[in-house]
Each structure stands twice: as structure tokens, then as C-alpha cells.
Amino acid sequence: MPIRNRLAEMHSEITGWRRHLHENPELMFDVHETAAFVQARLKEFGVDEITPGIGRTGVVAVIKGKTDTKGRVIGLRADMDALPIHEATGLDYASTTDGKMHACGHDGHTSILLGAAQYLAETRNFDGTAVLIFQPAEEGGGGGREMCRDGMMDRWGVHEVYGLHNAPGMPVGTFAIRPGALLASADEFEIVVTGKGGHAAEPQEAVDTTLVAAQILVSLQSIVARNVKPIERVVLTVGTLETDSNASNVIAHRVRMKGTVRTLDNNNRALVEQRIRDVATHTALAFGATAEVTWEDGYPVTVNHEAETAFAVEAAQAVVGEANVEPNVEPIMPAEDFSFMLEERPGAYIFLGNGDSAQCHHPEYNFNDEAIPVGCSWFAELIERRMPAVD
């Protein structure tokens, strides 16, 4: 079934919700006003249950179908948080809070799930239970992990879970997905090099930590070039390098560098961590310095389950037609904390075309409101297709 007539009728109203959220962005777990807005709409729709405070500030809502003969429960997830970016769109509904912006389209995701919620609450044309998950802190806070730690999946008996993300550059009215790894893990590391500070005119009396750090930085790239199979994807980036001196005639006693590692499988994730430790410590030792490596696990690889990916493809094809769905898109290296939910339950994550917009996390990015009925219809189709109504 293509875009539902009811959702097409609701397009203007849902767009209004989206633009309200865009004007009022909130960061990380501090999404209290956004969560309150979501709860107010859900109450208006007459959903069966609303529970706030899951994963600190997340909201979970329940909509029961006309019947429940098989007891199937399907979760649908949207993220609510914005980014610490100064908006440069010049829109009439641009952010009213300087330094905060919905630059990744979470305002659109939340509005799409709200639209699907209203449709499902009105029609209830399915056999089972839909659990709607409004998540905080996707942008680095691990809100998905926190909701899972709060026992969300067991508490509501979720069997499968699905989510979507807008994709700039893909035409509106298209979807893309793949089984297996879709988005990368994202881990962080810090390397502190300690040597012996001194005068720049007498380097023989010092252990030059800037030189050591530079050698480590260059050598780290050999991990991707020489330890990882060429057909596999790993991105290693050193983003900052700071010395403990600002003077040009001082050899720093200590240098600190920070970076990220992105991989598409756990074997490479473990391999790169160990090699970073080896390269840093042994390179420093060769120059008479020491290196301390700190590793912080971030979001895991987002891995779509095969059967659920096939269900997601079928639903997408029903909405926009087979020609507008790419079922085996290339994986990409950004990370997504929906991965935590996919580690707990089978499910799938899909890309929704956002048209010719600026890229996500750009100050001129804007969610394309024309994608709203497409995304709403996909959520609705999933529920009605996976839990068909019983006469």
C-alpha cells in the first residue's frame, strides 16, 4: 500500500510539529521540553500507555491493535536530541537557542513517529502491540544504551525493533538498507606521551615529546594500511594534538592526542585497539619516552538482522515501489546508538531519502518535510504487515 491517505491529510499538521521542534532544540539527555511535547501529542491521540523517564528522559508509548491473538510486540524508535551547532539556515523557524540546532534531522524522526502514532491509534488495524520509543541522547550520550539498561525491551516484551534515519543526497520517496553491518562502531582513544622537557636550543638534554607524538601519529596509520585486510573498512583519525607548552623555544614535557576509530566488525575493533596500544608504547620507548593509552568503547556496529531487514524492505517497497528501494546499500562509517537496541532484539535500521540538502551535522542542514508522509507510512506499513489484523 502506498502513502496512506490519512497520513497525507496529516502532512501539514505533522510539519507544524517538526518545525516547532526545530525552533526549540535540546541536547543530549536534557530533552525535557521535547519529551513533554511528545507526551502531550500522544495523550491527544489516545494511546494506551505513556511512560516517561526511561533512559533518564526517554518516552515509551503503547498502542494495542484491535486484536492480540499472537502476542507479538514490535518497537518503533525515533531520536529526539539536537546538536551543539550554530544554525545558519536563515529559516523562518530556525533555532531560537543560539548554539543548539537540529542539524541531524531528529526533529523529523520524532515527528514521523508521532504521525505514525496518531495513525495507528486511530486505525488500530493490526493484531498485536506497537511500542513507540522516543529516545534522548543519540548524539554521543548513548541514550539507546540507557533505555535498554532500564530494561525497556523486557518490560514491554518487545520482539522486534525498527528505526530510520534521513539521508541527504537520496531522493525523497526512496529508501536504502542492507542486512548485516550498516553503520560503524565509534570508539575513542587518548595517548599521553611523557618525555623530558627542556630548552629548544639544547634538545640533547631533553626527550622531545612533540617529535615522539608526531612519529606515533604517522605510525598509527600503518595499522589501517598494514594490519587490516584491504577489503575491510577501518577509519582511524587523530583529531587533536596538544603540548603542555605554548612557547616556540620550549620542548614540551608532555603531549596529549585524541582520536577515534570506526570499524564494521568486532574483530577489527579489537585488533585496532591492541595495535594502537602497541604502536604508541613501543614507539615512545624507542625515543626514550613513555606513552599511556586510554581507550573508551563507544557505539557498537549497527548490524541489521537478515529476516527483519527483509521485512523492512517489503514494507518500504509497499510504500514507494520496488524501484525506489535499495536493498543492499554500501555500509557507511558514521555510528548510531540504535545499535544497542539491535544487540538486544532482532530488527533493522533504514535510510529515508532527504533530497538535495546539506549533509547532517552541517549548520545549513534542514530536514525535508516532504519526507514525512513517506516515513510515517513505512512505520505504519511495518506494523500492519508484521501484525496483520485478524477479522
Image (spheres, rainbow, N blue to C red):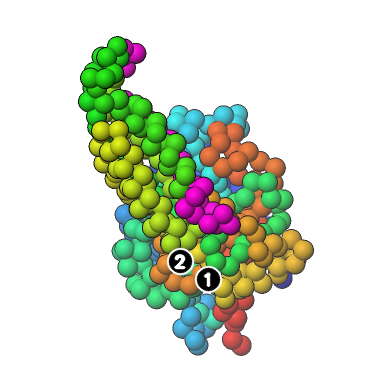
Of 267 and 145, which appears nearest the observer?
267
- Tag 1 residue: 305
Rendered location of residue 320, percent (x, y): 73, 63
Residues at circles 2 and 1 in contact by the CB criterion of under 8 Å: yes
Q: Amino acid at mark 2?
A: Leu
Residue lying at 49% horizontally and 37% vertically, measured from the top left: 101
Answer yes or no: is residue 218 visible: yes
Mark 1 crowdedness (10 Å alpha carbons): few <14, some 14-19, many ≥20? many
Answer yes or no: is residue 130 visible: no
- Circle 2 — which element? helix
Rendered location of residue 269, percent (x, y): 42, 56
Disc tally is 2
Q: Earlier in the sequence, mark 2 or mark 1?
A: 1
Residue lying at 56% horizontally and 79% vertically, measured from the top left: 387
Of 82 and 346, which appears nearest the observer?
346
- The quarter in which the C terminus is drawn is bottom right
Taking the magenta stretch, the answer to whether it contains residue 227 is yes
Report the span colored magenta.
224-249
Taking the magenta stretch, the answer to whether it contains residue 226 is yes
The quadrant where residue 286 appears: top left
Q: Which numbered tag is attached to residue 357?
A: none
Q: Amino acid at mark 1?
A: His
Of 189 and 216, which appears nearest the observer?
216
- The quarter in which the N terminus is drawn is bottom right
Image height check: is 230 above or below 260? below
Image height check: is 179 above or below 290? below
Residue lying at 24% horizontally and 22% vertically, measured from the top left: 206
Rendered location of residue 80, percent (x, y): 46, 50
Residue lying at 72% horizontally and 50% vertically, measured from the top left: 171
- Marks 2 and 1, how far apart in space? 8 Å
- Tag 2 residue: 342
Left or right of residue 140, residue 11 in this image: right
